[in-house]
Amino acid sequence: MLKQLPARPAINRRAKFRFVIVASNYNAKFVDALVAAAQKEIGLALPSATVTVHRVPGAFEIPLLVQEVACDADGVDAVMAFGVILQGKTAHADLIAKSVTDALMRISLETRVPVVHGVLHGTAAQARVRCLQPRANRGTEAARTALRMAQIFRGLTGR
Protein backbone atom coordinates (compact mmCIF):
# COMPACT_ATOMS: atom_id res chain seq x y z
CA MET A 1 0.00 0.00 0.00
CA LEU A 2 1.31 3.40 -1.00
CA LYS A 3 1.20 6.11 1.62
CA GLN A 4 1.25 9.83 0.97
CA LEU A 5 4.61 11.47 1.57
CA PRO A 6 4.84 13.77 4.60
CA ALA A 7 4.58 17.49 3.89
CA ARG A 8 7.74 19.52 3.43
CA PRO A 9 8.48 21.18 6.78
CA ALA A 10 8.50 24.96 7.01
CA ILE A 11 12.04 25.91 7.95
CA ASN A 12 14.13 29.08 8.03
CA ARG A 13 15.59 29.00 4.52
CA ARG A 14 18.63 31.02 5.58
CA ALA A 15 19.64 28.73 8.42
CA LYS A 16 22.86 26.78 7.93
CA PHE A 17 22.30 23.05 8.21
CA ARG A 18 24.61 20.15 7.42
CA PHE A 19 23.27 16.82 6.19
CA VAL A 20 25.10 13.65 5.25
CA ILE A 21 23.88 10.87 3.01
CA VAL A 22 25.47 7.43 3.31
CA ALA A 23 24.45 5.32 0.34
CA SER A 24 25.18 1.85 -0.94
CA ASN A 25 26.68 1.29 -4.38
CA TYR A 26 24.80 -2.01 -4.61
CA ASN A 27 21.51 -1.83 -6.56
CA ALA A 28 22.73 1.56 -7.80
CA LYS A 29 19.78 2.19 -10.14
CA PHE A 30 17.45 2.31 -7.15
CA VAL A 31 19.80 3.86 -4.59
CA ASP A 32 20.92 6.64 -6.95
CA ALA A 33 17.26 7.63 -7.38
CA LEU A 34 16.84 7.85 -3.59
CA VAL A 35 19.96 10.01 -3.27
CA ALA A 36 18.92 12.31 -6.12
CA ALA A 37 15.42 12.78 -4.69
CA ALA A 38 16.80 13.55 -1.22
CA GLN A 39 19.28 16.08 -2.58
CA LYS A 40 16.59 17.75 -4.66
CA GLU A 41 14.17 17.95 -1.72
CA ILE A 42 16.74 19.45 0.64
CA GLY A 43 17.75 21.94 -2.06
CA LEU A 44 14.13 23.01 -2.50
CA ALA A 45 13.39 23.28 1.21
CA LEU A 46 16.70 24.65 2.40
CA PRO A 47 18.95 26.00 -0.38
CA SER A 48 21.66 27.04 2.08
CA ALA A 49 22.12 23.51 3.43
CA THR A 50 25.24 21.48 2.85
CA VAL A 51 24.64 17.91 1.71
CA THR A 52 27.59 15.52 1.56
CA VAL A 53 27.25 12.07 -0.01
CA HIS A 54 29.44 9.13 0.96
CA ARG A 55 29.28 5.77 -0.82
CA VAL A 56 29.87 2.33 0.61
CA PRO A 57 29.93 -1.04 -1.19
CA GLY A 58 26.68 -2.49 0.18
CA ALA A 59 23.95 -2.09 2.77
CA PHE A 60 25.88 -4.00 5.44
CA GLU A 61 28.61 -1.34 5.37
CA ILE A 62 26.23 1.60 5.82
CA PRO A 63 26.08 1.66 9.66
CA LEU A 64 29.83 1.90 10.14
CA LEU A 65 30.10 5.03 8.00
CA VAL A 66 26.90 6.47 9.51
CA GLN A 67 28.48 6.08 12.93
CA GLU A 68 31.67 7.78 11.77
CA VAL A 69 29.89 10.83 10.33
CA ALA A 70 27.47 11.06 13.27
CA CYS A 71 30.49 11.33 15.58
CA ASP A 72 32.10 14.05 13.41
CA ALA A 73 33.43 16.85 15.60
CA ASP A 74 32.23 19.47 13.08
CA GLY A 75 28.66 18.40 13.73
CA VAL A 76 26.00 17.12 11.42
CA ASP A 77 22.32 17.92 11.76
CA ALA A 78 21.05 14.60 10.38
CA VAL A 79 22.26 11.56 8.48
CA MET A 80 20.27 9.73 5.83
CA ALA A 81 21.12 6.09 5.11
CA PHE A 82 20.12 4.74 1.67
CA GLY A 83 20.32 1.23 0.33
CA VAL A 84 18.16 -1.38 -1.33
CA ILE A 85 18.23 -4.98 -0.18
CA LEU A 86 16.39 -7.21 -2.62
CA GLN A 87 14.79 -10.33 -1.19
CA GLY A 88 16.19 -13.55 -2.60
CA LYS A 89 15.48 -17.21 -1.92
CA THR A 90 17.56 -17.38 1.27
CA ALA A 91 17.42 -15.59 4.62
CA HIS A 92 20.47 -13.47 3.76
CA ALA A 93 18.50 -10.33 2.85
CA ASP A 94 16.42 -10.58 6.04
CA LEU A 95 19.56 -10.92 8.15
CA ILE A 96 21.22 -7.91 6.52
CA ALA A 97 18.06 -5.79 6.80
CA LYS A 98 17.61 -6.56 10.49
CA SER A 99 21.28 -5.95 11.29
CA VAL A 100 21.31 -2.62 9.45
CA THR A 101 18.06 -1.49 11.07
CA ASP A 102 19.23 -2.36 14.58
CA ALA A 103 22.60 -0.68 14.03
CA LEU A 104 21.12 2.55 12.64
CA MET A 105 18.78 2.91 15.61
CA ARG A 106 21.59 2.23 18.07
CA ILE A 107 23.84 4.80 16.37
CA SER A 108 21.14 7.45 16.47
CA LEU A 109 20.43 6.85 20.14
CA GLU A 110 24.09 6.71 21.16
CA THR A 111 25.26 9.75 19.17
CA ARG A 112 22.05 11.78 19.59
CA VAL A 113 22.16 12.59 15.89
CA PRO A 114 19.02 11.92 13.86
CA VAL A 115 19.62 8.98 11.52
CA VAL A 116 16.94 8.52 8.89
CA HIS A 117 16.51 4.91 7.83
CA GLY A 118 16.17 4.75 4.06
CA VAL A 119 17.49 1.24 3.57
CA LEU A 120 14.67 -0.51 1.76
CA HIS A 121 14.04 -4.25 1.85
CA GLY A 122 11.73 -6.08 -0.49
CA THR A 123 11.22 -7.07 -4.09
CA ALA A 124 12.45 -5.37 -7.25
CA ALA A 125 8.86 -4.35 -8.01
CA GLN A 126 8.57 -2.66 -4.62
CA ALA A 127 11.94 -0.95 -5.14
CA ARG A 128 10.79 0.42 -8.51
CA VAL A 129 7.80 2.08 -6.85
CA ARG A 130 9.64 3.38 -3.77
CA CYS A 131 12.72 4.60 -5.63
CA LEU A 132 11.74 5.45 -9.19
CA GLN A 133 8.25 6.92 -8.87
CA PRO A 134 8.39 10.58 -7.79
CA ARG A 135 5.14 10.56 -5.81
CA ALA A 136 6.30 7.59 -3.73
CA ASN A 137 10.06 8.19 -3.62
CA ARG A 138 11.44 7.32 -0.20
CA GLY A 139 14.42 9.62 -0.80
CA THR A 140 12.03 12.58 -0.71
CA GLU A 141 10.40 11.18 2.41
CA ALA A 142 13.77 10.69 4.11
CA ALA A 143 14.85 14.24 3.28
CA ARG A 144 11.67 15.68 4.75
CA THR A 145 12.17 13.62 7.87
CA ALA A 146 15.81 14.73 8.15
CA LEU A 147 14.79 18.37 7.73
CA ARG A 148 12.13 18.11 10.41
CA MET A 149 14.36 16.24 12.85
CA ALA A 150 17.17 18.77 12.34
CA GLN A 151 14.70 21.56 12.99
CA ILE A 152 13.42 19.87 16.16
CA PHE A 153 16.96 19.29 17.46
CA ARG A 154 17.93 22.89 16.75
CA GLY A 155 14.95 23.99 18.85
CA LEU A 156 16.00 21.71 21.70
CA THR A 157 19.68 22.50 21.71
CA GLY A 158 19.69 26.09 20.47
CA ARG A 159 22.63 25.39 18.13
Image: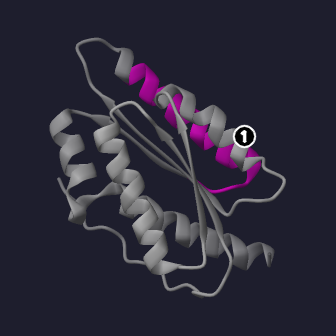
> Is 159 within the magenta?
no
Write the residue at 59% across / 42% down: 105
Label 1, on which residue?
68
Q: Is residue 107 above or below residue 4?
A: above
Using residue 79 as the reference point, say whether residue 40 is left or right of it: left
Residue 123 lies in quadrant? top left
What secondary structure characterizes most of the magenta part? Answer: helix
Q: Is residue 152 above or below residue 19?
A: below
Using residue 31 as the reference point, say whether residue 148 is left or right of it: right
Comparing 58 with 151, the one in front is: 58
Dot 1: element:
helix
> Is 104 within the magenta?
yes
Write the residue at 73% across / 54% down: 112
Q: Is residue 49 above or below residue 141?
A: below
Q: Residue furthest top?
A: 90
Quarter the C terminus occupies = bottom right
Q: Position of residue 146 (x, y in %)?
A: 54, 64
Write the residue at 15% across / 39% down: 125
Label 1, residues with CA under 10 Å away: few <14, some 14-19, many ≥20:
few
Q: Is residue 135 above or below residue 112?
A: below
Comparing 158 with 34, the one in front is: 34
Mark 1 belongs to which amino acid? Glu
Residue 102 lies in quadrant? top right
Magenta-colored span: 94-115
Residue 44 lies in quadrant? bottom left
